[in-house]
C-alpha cells in the first residue's frame, strides 16, 4: 500500500468532514471538536493535558494520533520537495 493510501486511511479513521457536523469543519471522529482547536491550543503554549481537559470528548489517543499524522504528512511533503 502506498503512503498516500495509508495516510488517507489514517485521516478517514481519525477525522470527520461532514456538512451536518460543524458545517463541514474537520473534527475529531465521533466528536464535534475541530482539529484546529488542538493546534490552536499548542500554538498558544497550552498543553495537551489542558486541551484534553477542556474537550473531554477527545481521547488522548485521538489527539496523539492526529499529531503523529500531521508530523508524517509534513515530513513526507518536506522530503518529497527536497528531491526535486
Image: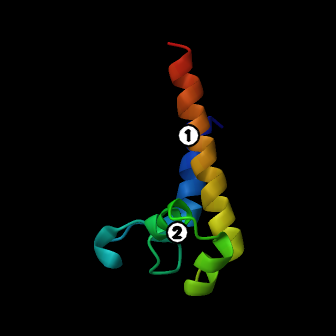
Q: Specify the color scheme.
A: rainbow
Question: Horizontal placement of 64 versus 79: left or right?
Answer: right
Q: Position of residue 3 (x, y in %)?
A: 62, 37
**Residue drawn at the location 53% of the way across and 49% of the way down:** 8
**Residue drawn at the location 60% of the way across and 60% of the way down:** 66
Q: Nearer the viewer, residue 58 or 54?
A: 54
| Residue under numbered circle 2 | 41
Q: Residues within 10 Å of mark 1 (few under 14, many from 20)?
A: few
Q: Indicate the quadrant where residue 61 lies.
A: bottom right
Q: Reading the chain from its start, which is encountered first: label 2 or label 1?
A: 2
Q: Under tag 1, what secondary structure?
A: helix
Relative vertical location of residue 5 with respect to residue 9 in this rendering, above or below: above
Q: Position of residue 51 (x, y in %)?
A: 59, 76
**Residue drawn at the location 64% of the way across and 70% of the way down:** 47
Q: Are marks 2 and 1 in contact (CB under 8 Å)?
A: no
**Residue drawn at the location 57% of the way across and 65% of the way down:** 45
Q: Under tag 2, what secondary structure?
A: helix
Q: Is residue 2 visible?
A: yes
Question: Horizontal placement of 13 versus 84: left or right?
Answer: right
Q: Residues within 10 Å of mark 2 (few under 14, many from 20)?
A: some
Q: Position of residue 70 (x, y in %)?
A: 57, 50
Question: Horizontal placement of 55 versus 1: left or right?
Answer: left
Q: Is residue 6 visible?
A: no
Distance of label 2 from label 1 (alpha carbons):
19 Å
Q: Which mark is residue 74?
A: 1
Q: Residue furthest right?
A: 61
Q: Indicate the quadrant where residue 65 lies.
A: bottom right
Relative vertical location of residue 33 with respect to residue 6 in this rendering, above or below: below
The image quadrant where one finds the N terminus is top right
Relative vertical location of residue 11 with respect to residue 38 in this rendering, above or below: above
Amino acid at each position: 500500500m502506498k503512503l498516500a493510501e495509508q495516510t488517507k486511511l489514517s485521516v478517514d479513521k481519525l477525522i470527520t468532514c461532514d456538512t451536518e457536523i460543524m458545517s463541514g469543519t474537520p473534527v475529531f471522529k465521533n466528536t464535534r471538536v475541530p482539529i484546529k482547536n488542538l493546534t490552536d491550543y499548542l500554538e498558544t503554549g497550552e498543553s495537551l493535558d489542558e486541551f484534553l481537559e477542556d474537550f473531554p470528548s477527545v481521547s488522548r489517543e485521538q489527539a496523539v494520533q492526529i499529531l503523529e499524522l500531521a508530523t508524517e504528512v509534513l515530513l513526507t511533503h518536506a522530503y518529497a520537495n527536497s528531491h526535486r
